[in-house]
Amino acid sequence: MTDMLFREDAYAREATGKVVAHTAEGGIVLDATIFYAQGGGQPGDSGALHWDGNMLEIATTVKGEEGQIVLVPAEPAPMPPIGCELRQSLDWDRRYRHMRVHTALHLLSVVIPLPVSGGSIGVEKGRLDFDMPESLEDKEAVQAALQALIDRDLPVSESWITDEELAANPGLVKTMSVMPPMGQGRVRLVRIGTDSNQVDLQPCGGTHVASTGEIGKIRLGKVEKKGARNRRVNLHLEE
């Protein structure tokens, strides 16, 4: 398995790594990486690898077999050889915006306390699909409530529970169609707020900001009807 350094420090912009494999599709597997692999609605990270005076641009990152994380080159080019020690650098601006949007979507699921049927994260905006038979009565009020939570600058932290503990507490899972990854023996929980100020706790494998104030100003966009009971709520970063 690839050591997921982004789990230890989501703010790490550079790190060393060792090439342990090349995939048949032309991807690169490191022993440890700060690159987040696409999943849970969050895109894979981009950036670059640097070794022996060479540089290889990485377009995205995906999950491979048996817990491997695969870095996908932007175009065919000479790859660092297996066993090579190198430096990896993130496209930090892109990743940080993903972190802000992802954390904002967690809070969106707080102010709209309905089951979530899907979601997506981008650089400028994100969205959640809700089991919502009727449209929002007052989108401006929802936006104000969301911004108020953001402005409280609540800490964002993580903890872990066992698969069995999650199975015994199904209310932690807000998503209807996608279950958190299980089978590894434990599941990561992301908590927003602490003690009596806790506002959210749910399983999530993505990257988040350390406090909600980092999200900044947001705006709710279109509320789109996507089915008899499904409505998509779009959220935009305003700065």
Image (tube, rainbow, N blue to C red):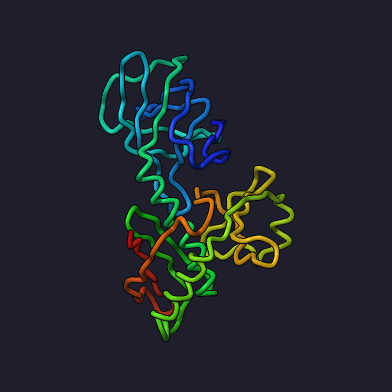
Residue 82, picture quadrant: top left
What residue do we see at 53% from left, 65% from top? 152
Whole-percent x and y of residue 134? Answer: 43, 84
Establish if 89 lies above or below 50: below
Q: Is residue 67 visible?
A: yes
Q: Where is residue 12 in the image (x, y as percent from the top left)?
A: 48, 36
Quarter the N terminus occupies: top right
Q: Which residue is drawn at 43% across and 45% down?
A: 38
Q: Is residue 173 left or right of residue 24?
A: right
Quarter occupied by the C terminus: bottom left
Residue 135 seen: no
Q: How many labels does the image show?
A: 0
* Vertical comparison of 88 with 194: above or below: above
- Judging depth in this view, the residue of 21 and 31 nearest the camera is 31
**Residue at left offset 54%, top offset 70%:** 110
* Rendered image quadrant of residue 171: bottom right
Q: Is residue 39 above or below residue 57?
A: below
Q: x and y percent of residue 53 in the render? A: 31, 15
Seen from the viewer's position, the closer of residues 185 and 5 is 5
Residue 28 place in picture, x, y as percent: 41, 27
Nearer to the camera, 60 or 195: 195
Name the residue located 51 percent from the left edge and 73 percent from the top edge: 111
Q: Is residue 136 left or right of residue 53?
A: right
